[in-house]
Amino acid sequence: MENLRKEDTLNKKENDIVFTKTLKAGKRIYYLDVKKNKKDEFFLAITESKKIISGEDSNPIVQFEKHKIFLYQEDFDKFTSGLNEVMTYIKNNSPEKDSEEKIENF
């Protein structure tokens, strides 16, 4: 009976992702997973996975450092607004940009 519970838990864990998008960016991979909670409400799980290689060159140790944030539907507008504002600031104020490349809104 305990094995069935473990299998149910594993299946539930795999099945709670209803949509996913993977973004590869250098040493990092971002996973944008739409999941369901127990009330069948959707939320966004953002995972950053970074490959870390340590050890000797002849015997490297590969590990992945992961960070997660969970974003719930009632916070989407505030999060999107804040993210756009911060991204616009960075694009407009980065030292490597010249004044012709400034953008109005992202």
Image (spheres, rainbow, N blue to C red):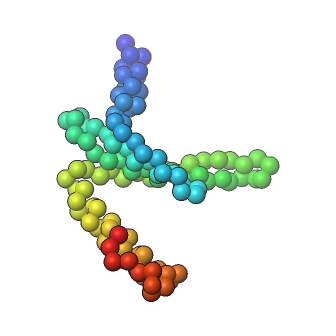
Relative to 21, residue 92 above or below: below
At which x and y percent is residue 35?
32, 40
Question: Which quadrant would the C terminus be assigned to in this image?
Answer: bottom left
Q: Residue furthest bottom?
A: 99
Q: Residue furthest top?
A: 1
The one of 70 and 54 positioned closer to us in this rendering: 70
Q: Is residue 13 left or right of residue 38?
A: right
Residue 38 visible in the shown view? yes
Q: Is residue 22 left or right of residue 89?
A: right
Q: Is residue 34 left or right of residue 52?
A: left
At which x and y percent is residue 22?
46, 47
Relative to 100, residue 43 above or below: above
Q: Quadrant of residue 100?
A: bottom left
Q: Is residue 2 left or right of residue 71?
A: right
Residue at 76%, 53% in the rendered image: 56
The one of 83 and 49 positioned closer to us in this rendering: 83
Q: Quadrant of residue 19?
A: top left
Residue at 40%, 48% in the rendered image: 32
Residue 86 visible in the shown view? no
Residue at 42%, 16% in the rendered image: 3
Q: Residue furthest right?
A: 58
Q: Quadrant of residue 88?
A: bottom left
Q: How many marks?
A: 0
Residue at 23%, 62% in the rendered image: 78
At which x and y percent is residue 23?
48, 51
At which x and y percent is residue 51?
59, 52
Question: Which quadrant would the N terminus be assigned to in this image?
Answer: top left
